[in-house]
Amino acid sequence: MPAARNDTTHAPSSSCRRGRRAKRPTARQGSTWLCLLVGLAILAVTAADASAEPLCTNTWIGGAEGNWQEAANWSAGHAPTSTDVACIGTGKKVNAWGEANHAGVLEVAGTLQITGTSLEVSNTLEPSTVAHLETSGGVLTGAANVNVTDPSRATAARLR
């Protein structure tokens, strides 16, 4: 018995058949694509320029005033480390004192007080913001950019 042949041939689609050309886009279709590409380019540039605030990884949950080093005052259950985005809300005053303190990024809408110690801010990729800064024998240090939004309220600030 001869072997069955399973030859299948596919006819080319109508736009690919020899001697036929695919239709060119009309002027209107071309301008639609151009508008779409320009719109996407503008959106990409706008998104790249927008500076979103970093997400808080350790948020102050203590009272209106309190100690930076006290673990119970922070949402992560520990004082901020050099990898944390430390966030302090409006109307809060947090005092960093005693031992050396750290944060990767600061987002302080309230008051940050540094007394007799240092607070090192280490993340150079994200700028930090501090609304009100007070120092008394303390130093705000580190490689990061820190913007004090109300410099008229900065008292005896020492930065390194």
Image: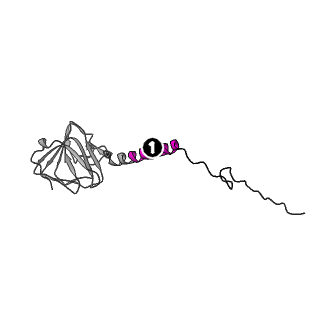
Query: Which sits in the foreground, 147 or 89?
Result: 147
Compared with residue 15, is residue 64 higher up or lower down, i.e. above or below?
A: above
Whether residue 76 is visible: no
What secondary structure is found at the residue carrying circle 1?
helix
* Residue 141 x %, y %: 18, 55
Residue located beneath label 1 in the image? 35
Q: Nearer the viewer, residue 8 or 24?
A: 24
Q: How many marks?
A: 1
Q: Amino acid at mark 1?
A: Cys
Confirm whether the magenta stretch covers residue 39.
Answer: yes
Q: Does the magenta stretch mainly form a helix, a strand or a loop?
A: helix
Q: Is residue 7 visible?
A: yes
Can you give x and y, in whole percent of width and height, for residue 129 in the image?
A: 23, 46
> Which region of the structure is painted magenta?
24-43
Q: Give the x, y percent position of residue 110.
A: 20, 39
Left or right, 75 with respect to 7, comes to: left
Indicate yes or no whether the magenta region holds residue 115: no
Q: Position of residue 69 (x, y in %)?
A: 22, 48
